[in-house]
Image (spheres, rainbow, N blue to C red):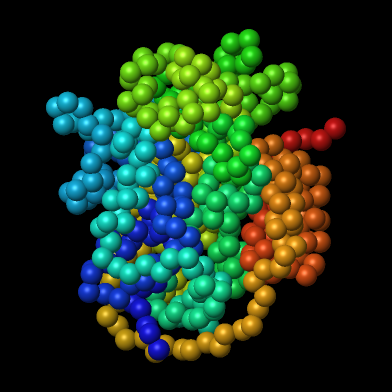
Amino acid sequence: MTEYDVVIIGAGVAGLYASMNIPAEKKVLIINKRETFKCNTFYAQGGVALARDEADIPMHIKDTLAAGDGLCDPEAVDVLSQNSRQAIDDLIEQGFCFDTNEEGELLYTKEAAHSCERILHAGGDATGRYLHHFLLEHTAHAMLSDARVVDLLIDNGECYGVTVLDHRQRRNIYAKNVIIASGGVGSLYEYHTNAPCISADIQGLCVMKGVALDRMEMLQFHPTVFVNSNNAQKMLLTEALRGEGATIEDETGRRFLFDYDERGELASRDIVSKAIYKYKKKTGMHVYLNCENFDKEYFEHRFPNICKNLRELGFNVPAKRVPISPAFHYAIGGIRTDLNARVPNVKNLYAVGEVASTRVHGANRLASNSLLEGLVFAKRAVDDILKNIDTPKNMKTFELHDEVMSLKDDKAKKDQLRRIMWENVSIIRTKSGLNDALSTINALLNENIGKLLKFRLLTAKEIVISALNRHESIGVHTIQEEN
């Protein structure tokens, strides 16, 4: 029986940074569902937020708490901010290059709801891509790609490894410790910015295994997304655009966001998303992102990928404005963890990154705190694991069960689920809409379906139930009164 010190599920920022912090002589396996670049980290544009120095920590904490609308865990926010500079300095010491000016000084930018410029970026608008590539190059450990985890080997409150589906064959992989870093729930929605394989599998598996999920109703929708395409994954237009001067306007050129918040384009994402949603519904007008305030040369240098992609679609940016809409972006809730990323009541099981709920984001994630959270809590998980990594463990073996993973009708049911979630469980929710979604999800769960679809449905059900259980509107969760 092959036994690893640590198995890491997922190869985004959290999983790879965890791997990078585990000594090379330890036996570690990273399990990646698809090609390595198909993760949300790769598509992250804006950058990494941090407290610039000791003096900025109180303000970074204050901004994070304010965005979180009273639901952040102050201790978790303190951990995030206090450790932010250390995480960034570690990356730089290891050789990662953030964008700098001609004097070699780090370039900071501002995004919505930040009180100062404190976001670092790389490659202009390609921070996630650069960081992901760097972390891949700097991990010393083995990776199993094109394999998906379909079971957690848990017995009597202790995790012993995972079952993977590897080239359509199931097998058990045993480990002293398991770190879940599998990302969010994007594929549950008809319109989203996530990588295509972010499909909420592990959250549904946790429901099946009795592992607690937390605040699943807290889902963030990015306000500025180009959705006029046939792909499920839509093109994100980073918040840094608005932070540096882009405006949002209606068909007549009116900047209507000030009707909803005095900060206009620099209000927090939940406010901007809801304002666009309500304004479009009230007026029937299209909404646009206008970048004409940018110098053409600066825009091409600062946002090279956005510039290239939009021009290929026929938009001569920054001169021409771009039609936008909100789309699902980020799961704030997830697997409940403590401040060392441990999953309560399951020994040797950890969760980091978007899949986890550290409660650091409260009811609304502050822009660019997500990559930072992945870095900080991945390091804390590894630090906790390394305390006992050399302690022998009496490994249990588990039988493989013959289960149907997917059926030919599952694809149509997945599409049905995505429509239901977008229509009834998105930016503005109603009790009747949530109940309709719950009824449909329950009906689908009672049909003959494969296990992979069951994972998605169980995750969706948890989101809907959590939304029904939170009766007041707060942060990204808005319950609208019905007539």
Vertical order, 52 against 1 (above or below) = above
Q: Is residue 223 visible?
A: no
Q: Nearer the viewer, residue 453 or 478?
A: 453
Question: Quarter holding the N terminus?
Answer: bottom left
Q: Nearer the viewer, residue 339 or 168?
A: 168
Vertical order, 230 against 76 (above or below) = above
From the top left corner, tell me how far across and down residue 7 is, in percent. 39, 72
Quadrant location of residue 472?
Answer: top right
From the top left corner, tell me how far across and down residue 156 is, in percent. 53, 83
Instruction: Give me the residue at 52% from left, 87% from top.
Output: 398
Name the residue at the left extreme.
Answer: 103
Q: Judge left or right: residue 459 versus residue 4.
A: right
Q: Nearer the viewer, residue 221 or 295?
A: 295
Name the residue at the right extreme.
Answer: 483
From the top left corner, tell me how far across and down residue 291 is, in percent. 46, 18
Q: Is residue 245 visible?
A: yes
Vertical order, 426 against 347 (above or below) = above
Instruction: Give me the residue at 74% from left, 47% from top.
Output: 420
Instruction: Give me the residue at 49% from left, 81% from top.
Output: 172
Tally the numbered discs: 0
Question: Quarter holding the C terminus?
Answer: top right
From the top left corner, tell me how far across and down residue 287 is, in percent. 62, 21
Instruction: Give me the residue at 40% from left, 79% from top.
Output: 175
